[in-house]
Amino acid sequence: MPQEHRLILKHADQPGYTPDLECYLRHGGYDALKKVLALAPKDLPDGKKMSPQEQVREDVKASGLRGRGGAGFSAGIKWSLVDRRSGKPIYLICNADESEPGTFKDRQIIHKDPHQLIEGMILSCWANDVKLAYLYIRGEMPQGAKLLNKALDEARAKNFLGKNILGSGFDLEIHLHRGAGAYICGEETGLIESLEGKRAYPRIKPPYFPAVLGLYMCPTIVNNVETLCHVKHIVSMGPGEYAKLGTPNNTGTRIVSLSGDVKRPGYFEIEVGKVTIGELINDPAFGGGLRDGRKLKAIIPGGSSSKILKAGETFKLNRKGADGQMTKVEVPLLDLPYDFDSLMGAGTMSGSGAIIVLDDTRDIVEALANLAEFYAHESCGQCTPCREGALWMSKALHRMTHGEGRKADADYLLHIAQNIQGRTICAFGEAAAWPVLSFVKKFKEDFEAKGAADEAKAAAAKH
Amino acid sequence: MSAPATTEAKPAAPPAPAAPPPPSDKIKIKVDGREVEVPKMMPDWQGKPQPTTMLQACQLAAHEVPHYCYHPKLPIAGNCRMCLVEFGTPQMGPDRKPVLNEDGTPKIAKSVLPYEPGTPRGAIACATPISPGMEIYPNSPATKQMREAVLESLLINHPLDCPICDQAGECKLQEYSVEHGQAQSRFVEAKVHKPKAVDLGPRIVLDDERCVLCTRCIRFTKDIAGDDALGIVNRGSYNTIAAWAEGKFDNNYTLNTVDICPVGALTSKDFRFQMRVWFMKETKSLCTSCGTGCNIVVGSREEKVYRYEPRQNDAVNSTWMCDSGRLNYKWIGRADRLQKCGMRIAERGMLEVAWPTALKAISAKLASAPSGSVAIVASARQTTEELFLLAKLAKKFNALTDSVARNAEGDKLLVNADKNPNSNGARLTGIAGPQLGANLAKISDGLRSGGIRTLIVFGEDVTKHGIGADLLAKLDTLIVSDILPSATTAAAHFVLPGCAHLEKRGTFVNVKGRVQKFMKAVEAPGDARPEWEFLHELVHNVTGQNGFSTIEGLFNEMAREVPGFAGLEWAKLGDTGVTVQI
Ligand SMILES: Cc1cc2nc3c(=O)[nH]c(=O)nc-3n(C[C@H](O)[C@H](O)[C@H](O)COP(=O)(O)O)c2cc1C
Ligand code: SF4
Ligand code: SF4
Ligand code: SF4
Ligand code: FES
């Protein structure tokens, strides 16, 4: 039987568990911090010594932890790319902008267990010689901001933050910064600009890779809330134990936000790759199936930006056999393990870990129009293809959902979206283009039928 | 599209370059299939060496990559995406060594979308550094398609009102649409409407619908002029350029944004609707409103000046100029310009006379003037050649000479506190000492005591500089050349109508010793003549010296005679001048 495996959210929903420091300490809070502060340099076979900080960085790499913010990039590798020789301070930013439609996992941590995040941040800062860190929280989460500020104060009062933390000589300050309500502030370089007090225009890469030229043009680490929480568990459990959770190259647990047409929408923490999409939708432990009499139409598997998967689709995935040989196996949609690599193999992504389920009562054109409107509204407008293309797609879809569609609109939409993806400053371009490309390609009949019907109606009205 | 700029014979070939740099400073790449070797590092917008970009490399290979937001003197924004190009890099094997083709050439891996390996992934040429062995395909079908798509996007919400747009003829949107666009857009939706005729500041009007949001104006204003006055409001396709408060875009450099705006969004209140750009003649000249000597192009038609625009000179003004200098040209066309020679005859007052009459009479007067009885006040707004000729006269009479100092506040960017365009010319020719105006008191003493009987004034109203009408009245002979009437011309025995610098050729020496020449843009009104021409006649008549009757010859003679200009030649000044020690 597939089950939740609660690591990050272990305590969050337990009766009586409160977001204050006392409660966190009663549950072993800040023990991981005490553990790393007690670490001694490690002797290496070549006679050199490895600093405790470097040991933790190596542990994070060895744990296989991949970013939970969207791109699934290895946290350990991200940390190893930081320019440590520039002589400039290194900053760490926790990305708590959680704005991807369908995603509501970071806020569970923020609201129910803020100290876990703070401890994860302190550990990550300590491991990377960061003395000043920022917590950038989405503007629409005022309660979360309040709770985090209170938790930061509590941590300061107990000297988990501040000067000479627990007598270790390590200084760290964390500032909370509230966004003002823009999805693009979740894009790490847009976030950095916003944090610098500017319009959140994402930066061009090259040259502005955060690891080298980030906040205030200093080396900067940007990690998602959930990613940073995992660091605490990697430290507590050790990388070996941690990596036993999940599946190879897709280690640990991850919180899945499940929404849309299921009986039990909600968030579920699973071992990555140990639960299939079908189980997440249908198992009583998770979504509990579609509403009675409904059939699955499609799912959006990794937040609104990910490419839609159509009910009944099958995918050819690489699988390592018992003999260690890679073979291609055909996997139906509902049997796809929910992990980074399987979804990539299916031509989409697990993104922010948010599954949106659409049943057969949904009008696919309406659904896409809704998403397109979001992207048109949230495009920062800095670069031409996204600025003009996002609104163009939205206008076309608005037309299509208001009785003025054309049969040719399907190809028209593909044309616009193809001219956005891969040509923009930031990945918002893909985020805006992918829904359109995948919806229209996979449901072309629906789009063409709708357009043709409108044209027929218009022609009839003329006579 | 406009008439070619007036240029002199091409400057002689530049001096042979120093020994070629060691090979490690170069990178071999291919542009459009042709191998080129380009420097590894090239100057960025501030002149600092940075890894060479694809766009710079293509430029060196004579391939202009179309662009809107890129400007060589502004920080890179990378937002327009017009410069996207398809490219490839040598494929690396697992051993980190290049994979070779059968013929031994390195195998090139074209850049593709990671999630869609069949689709090329372009890079923005303006911001992407080149790497050894890189291949850039500036003309490939994929590159062309990317450009077409960007243009289509830029045009969908554009008003396309070229017939009434001031930028028509120098608009990059028009130009690129013809070169790189497609005939028909697929767009069938309603356009976005934005504010028209926005009063951005006292000198600038903005049409937000025409704006392509390249942010050149914002970057110039913030990063060059140091003013955070401009920004973007709203989001996405509704993005709109705005000043922090309507009408408040008001630093002394705002008009540069009109020059760099690639479309007709920003217009100069002074110039808009005045003249179609393709009707104008363009002449290389200088701004004369301060000692910086910004290089300019003068736009004129039928002897009327319509605008100044900055002309690139990295030793002087980069590609900018200040608003006050730019707009200071209207006096040239003033109705009260001096247009006739005047000669005062006892009882009959000032008579209009022809040039030969005036020059003959003046020559006769000067011929009898004893040494030490003449003084000369020559403006540091006169050309160096004119000052040189006046210095010759001064030498003949052992005359006291000086110019007038003009000082006001300068700024950190271009504006200099010295408001004369040629103070250093006055110093180098010996007309003035280090401190301009230091001799004026001595000259007025000479007038008062009666020792000075003849005063020659060029281009100044000396009554405003301590030599009042009462003193002038004591003179036997007051010879004045000027452009506009003044209290000094009113007191003169001889009035010689001179030329504004736009009406003649010559040189100025700026505050840093840059000797720069300027060309003639328009004809002088009436009988007005370039001062160097008639001064040349006077010097000949008075001293017997026969100089050159061309400006080239005159300059070269000056360079031979005046130590400060040693080694210079008119032809070698080029369009951007030469710096001398000051
Ligand atoms: C348009 C856009 C929006 C994003 N929004 C978020 C967000 O709300 N939260 C987040 O953690 N990451 C977001 N990301 C991803 C971040 O850029 C960045 O990759 C992430 O914070 C890195 O953290 P991780 O490596 O721990 O996943 C967004 C990316 C894009 C392109
Ligand atoms: S892709 Fe869109 S969101 Fe990203 S920089 Fe360009 S316009 Fe802004
Ligand atoms: S007004 Fe002109 S310079 Fe400024 S952003 Fe628009 S197009 Fe660019
Ligand atoms: S800085 Fe001086 S020379 Fe340059 S434009 Fe202004 S006034 Fe003219
Ligand atoms: S010129 Fe605009 S992106 Fe390169």
Image (cartoon, coloured by chain):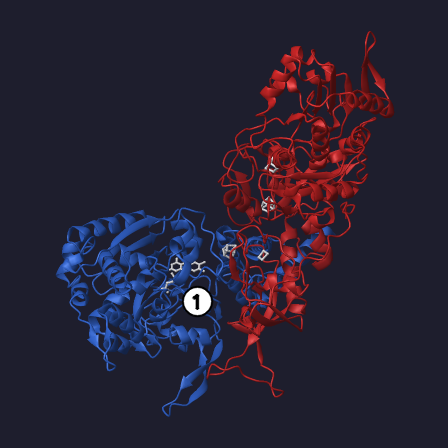
Residue occupying the far bottom of the picture = A323
Type of amino acid under label 1: Arg
At 48% from the left edge and 75% from the top edge, which residue is drawn? A312
Disc 1 within 8 angstroms of ligand 1 (CB): no
Residue beneath disc 1: A294
Q: Farthest residue toward the front?
A: B371
Q: Is residue B189 visible?
A: no
Given residues A245 and A197, the one toward you in this image is: A197
Front in this rendered view, residue A452 or B570: B570
Write down which chain is painted blue: A
Circle 1 packing at 10 Å, graded few (<14), some (14-19), many (20+), is: some
Q: Left or right of B226: which side holds A3? A: left
Q: In the rendered image, which quarter is residue B128 located in?
A: bottom right
The location of residue B368, given as percent across then percent down, is 78, 20
Q: Which chain is mark 1 on? A: A
Chain in red (letter): B
